């Protein structure tokens, strides 16, 4: 992925410095060019962003420049109109650390990168949970309310004040933004203080009072999200004539190449589709027609607009139609489609040279180059940097933190990307030391490094690419010479990727339920290393797995196909068990892009917000999440969600199906899943699912409820069992309703303490890999 941010200064386009990406002046307009490589070539998005205080001339100039850039790119980009405070989910996904709105504009003498970065005094009002925005507000207690996060930025000190009604997710996102300001704008040389309870932070409150004065009276109540409360207004008269040709369900044949069409998504978003054979005047007038349509319908002026060219449709646009097919498109396990009918079913070899020449790019981070630069890796040991043996580059352990310095040339001079990789089981001291050492390393390179904090399991594609297909993520342990605990004799790795630019192997629990027919897995034992090839994996994936196999095991390699496993394979995994293997599951992956929505009433009104590029970390414990996989609708219930959200989520899921533009089957199952008890057909949609993430469960029993229009079935899985019933038992031998991944949960407190020598509370406070090892030793794995 490449991303370019341009501001308009005196009606001219001026590039924005990379360190200022995500910061927007309210008095300006911006253009964002976003390019993502795909297996079919590249996908280009052009956004023009309108600040709330920008002039009509600037807005007109931005629209004109976007049209010119679209022409220069042969009409391939998808064009977007973004209005401050009402940005699309796609736009917000580019800025993972949040968006900051600054007062004024470049024309007023402001600069994106201040020369004196510490001479600052401002108050930022932080809003949002999944996508964060921060607006500069008046330096006064009158700006505060009980429900939001506020950042008092004093240059060398950043104070995060959390309202008493804030959720954990909002506080967490606020801290991410504070750290982003510290690292990108202050080079890491600023202190962050957090006020979660004013009585517990007298020193920080004293600083705030010195800046803001004494506070008089009560704070205001929480302010609802204004974006969620936008309502359609009454229609206005307008000269624009639009003929309605169809309502849902929409079919692809409605779009004729000779014309341009407006697709109205209920006032939430407006699409303009430009046919290949439509006139040049019609194509140029796309934005103008869309704005006129919004005015005629009485929709808010902030309504998102997306302009799409015939043949370059976005995935989101295609999903609005009942069925969408591409000419000679290869899908799934080699199925080839023509425009209209299925022509033939055969195995098709993908063009691997294209994959090597055009690697897949991640939405989370910019792909700065082709990953051909130099790398150096250090491990944090005793809070200091220790060089890692180059022979082991690419091997990361969950108990460690690492610094990876990537150096590449641009215009003949070196540029740097500094990755801070944080293991899931690393200590707080090690994570802190990693950040501090990164600052020192950045200093040695002239404070020029782009610093990227990488959380275990969420590695961006450029990070994968620089290790040339040899990236291995071990769940726990350490790469230090003096290891505290021995490495497990049996390990299982899930391998995903088709070439050197996008492959990684992630350790998963060594049990049969971790398998997935769509992937290749490596099972390392003391005698042999099995390469297990699922029915849905490709030849390229198998080849990459062979490369990784030599890293995870020095034993002989044995390739086995799904369905032809020897008995020893299942014995190593503790016996056979169900896993994600249904054929329909494989076809869903190719025909429909799954979508995840957050369902919450924390703003005061029940709303559903889409999460772009989702993973397990996006499942928020405070909310209900809706996962749409086409054949099912999953409602994932976080343990801290409230009753209102749960009840509304079920009703909203039914309404979601009823109003879907593709004319969805209203009998589609709606499956309610409780946190910590996710079934395989849910977890299979997430890469490297961690079944131990929520080991300390607040639920009484594992419950999966299936809803449809006429029934509600709730199987009961509650109970306490004797140790004889649970220990050293395969899945088939366990009592009905017992979760095989949590056998120990069903022990009585007395038996649990007798077997493990500790209480359940103490056990679940241990790192997950330690829990795993003890369960193996006790026959409860």
Image (cartoon, grey):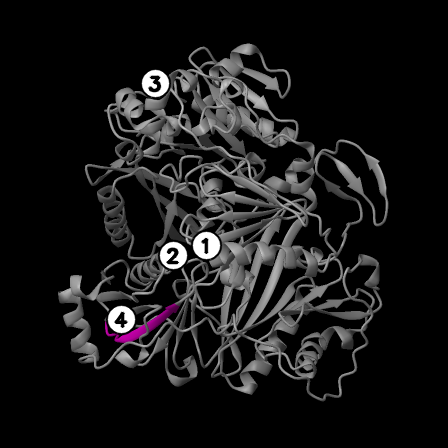
N-terminal of the pair, mark 4 or mark 1, is 4
Range of the magenta residues?
A: 117-126
User: Which percent across, then down, holds residue 623?
Assistant: 46, 54
* Residue 120 sits inside the magenta stretch: yes
Can residue 611 be seen in this snapshot? no
User: Which percent across, then down, holds residue 380?
Assistant: 25, 39
Q: Are marks 2 and 3 in contact (CB under 8 Å)?
A: no
The span from disc 2 to disc 4 (Cα, nearest Å) is 19 Å
The span from disc 4 to disc 1 (Cα, nearest Å) is 28 Å
User: Which percent across, then down, holds residue 653?
Assistant: 61, 55
Q: Which residue is mark 4?
A: 152
The span from disc 2 to disc 1 (Cα, nearest Å) is 10 Å
N-terminal of the pair, mark 3 or mark 4, is 4
Kindly identify which numbered label has been placed on residue 778.
3
Q: Are marks 2 and 4 in contact (CB under 8 Å)?
A: no
Q: Which residue is mark 1?
A: 623
Q: Quadrant of residue 754?
A: top left
Taking depth in this image into account, of 433 and 693 the one nearest to the observer is: 693
Residue at 83% over, 46% down? 338
Residue at 55% over, 56% down? 649
The span from disc 3 to disc 1 (Cα, nearest Å) is 36 Å
């Amino acid at each position: 992925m490449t991303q370019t941010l341009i501001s308009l200064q005196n009606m001219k386009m001026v590039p924005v410095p990379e360190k200022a990406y995500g910061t927007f002046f309210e008095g300006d307009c911006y253009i964002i060019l976003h390019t993502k490589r795909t297996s079919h070539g590249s996908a280009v998005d052009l956004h023009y962003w309108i600040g709330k205080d920008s002039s009509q001339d600037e807005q007109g100039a931005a629209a004109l420049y976007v049209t010119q850039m679209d022409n220069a790119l042969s009409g391939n980009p998808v064009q977007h109109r973004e209005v401050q405070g009402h940005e699309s989910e796609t736009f917000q996904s580019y800025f993972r650390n949040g968006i900051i709105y600054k007062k004024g504009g470049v024309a007023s003498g402001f600069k994106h990168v201040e020369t004196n970065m510490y001479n600052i005094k401002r108050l930022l009002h932080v809003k949002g949970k999944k996508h964060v925005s921060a607006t500069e507000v008046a330096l006064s207690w009158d700006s505060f309310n009980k429900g939001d996060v506020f950042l008092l930025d004093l240059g060398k000190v950043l104070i995060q004040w959390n309202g008493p009604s804030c959720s954990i997710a909002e506080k967490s996102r606020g801290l991410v933004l504070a750290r982003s300001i510290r690292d990108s704008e202050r080079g890491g040389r600023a202190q962050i203080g957090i006020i979660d309870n004013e009585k517990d932070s007298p020193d920080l409150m004293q600083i705030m009072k010195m800046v803001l004065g004494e506070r008089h009276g009560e704070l205001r109540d929480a302010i609802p999200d204004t974006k969620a409360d936008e309502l359609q207004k009454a229609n206005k008269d307008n000269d624009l004539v639009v003929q309605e040709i169809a309502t849902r369900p929409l079919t692809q044949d409605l779009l004729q190449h000779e014309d341009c069409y407006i697709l109205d998504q209920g006032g939430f978003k407006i699409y303009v589709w430009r046919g290949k054979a439509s006139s040049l005047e019609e194509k140029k007038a796309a934005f103008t027609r869309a704005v006129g349509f919004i005015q005629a319908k009485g929709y808010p002026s902030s309504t998102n607009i997306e302009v799409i060219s015939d043949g370059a449709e976005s995935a989101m646009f295609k999903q609005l139609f009942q069925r969408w097919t591409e000419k000679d498109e290869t899908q799934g396990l080699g199925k080839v489609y023509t425009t209209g009918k299925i022509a033939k079913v055969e195995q098709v070899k993908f063009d691997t040279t294209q994959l090597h020449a055009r690697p897949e790019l991640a939405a989370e981070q910019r792909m700065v180059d082709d990953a051909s630069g130099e790398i150096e890796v250090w491990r944090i040991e005793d809070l200091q940097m220790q060089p890692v043996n180059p022979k082991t580059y690419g091997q990361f352990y969950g108990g460690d933190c690492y610094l990876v310095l990537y150096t590449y040339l641009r215009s003949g001079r070196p540029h740097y990307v500094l990755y801070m990789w944080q293991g899931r089981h690393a200590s707080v001291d090690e994570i802190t030391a990693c950040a501090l050492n990164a600052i020192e390393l950045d200093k040695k390179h002239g404070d020029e490094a782009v610093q990227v904090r990488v959380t275990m399991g969420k590695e961006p594609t450029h990070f994968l690419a620089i290790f040339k297909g040899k990236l291995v993520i071990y769940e726990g342990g350490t790469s230090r010479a003096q290891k505290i605990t021995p490495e497990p004799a049996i390990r299982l790795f899930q391998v995903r990727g088709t070439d050197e630019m996008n492959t990684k192997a992630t350790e998963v629990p060594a049990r049969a339920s971790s398998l997935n027919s769509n992937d290749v897995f490596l099972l390392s034992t003391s005698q042999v290393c099995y390469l297990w090839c699922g029915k849905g994996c490709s030849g390229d994936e198998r080849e990459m797995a062979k490369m990784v196999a030599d890293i995870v095991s020095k034993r002989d390699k044995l390739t086995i196909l799904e369905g032809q496993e020897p008995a020893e394979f299942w014995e190593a995994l503790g016996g056979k068990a169900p896993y994600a293997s249904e054929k329909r599951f494989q076809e869903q992956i190719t025909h429909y892009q799954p979508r995840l929505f957050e369902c919450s009433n924390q703003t005061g009104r029940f709303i559903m917000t889409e999460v772009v590029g989702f993973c397990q970390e996006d499942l928020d414990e405070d909310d209900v999440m809706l996962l749409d996989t086409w054949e099912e609708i999953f409602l994932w219930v976080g343990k801290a969600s409230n009753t209102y959200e749960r009840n509304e989520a079920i009703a909203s899921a039914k309404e979601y199906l009823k109003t879907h533009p593709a004319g969805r089957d209203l009998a589609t199952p709606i499956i309610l899943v409780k946190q910590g008890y996710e079934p395989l057909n849910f977890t299979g949609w997430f890469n490297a699912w961690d079944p131990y993430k929520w080991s300390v469960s607040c639920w009484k029993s594992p419950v999966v409820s299936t809803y449809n229009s006429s029934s509600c079935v709730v199987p009961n899985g509650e109970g306490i069992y004797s140790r004889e019933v649970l220990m050293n038992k395969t899945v088939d031998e366990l009592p009905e309703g017992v979760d095989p991944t949590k056998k120990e949960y069903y022990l009585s407190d007395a038996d649990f303490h007798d077997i493990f020598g500790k209480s359940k509370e103490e056990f679940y406070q241990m790192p997950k890999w330690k829990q795993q090892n003890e369960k193996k030793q006790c026959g409860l794995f």
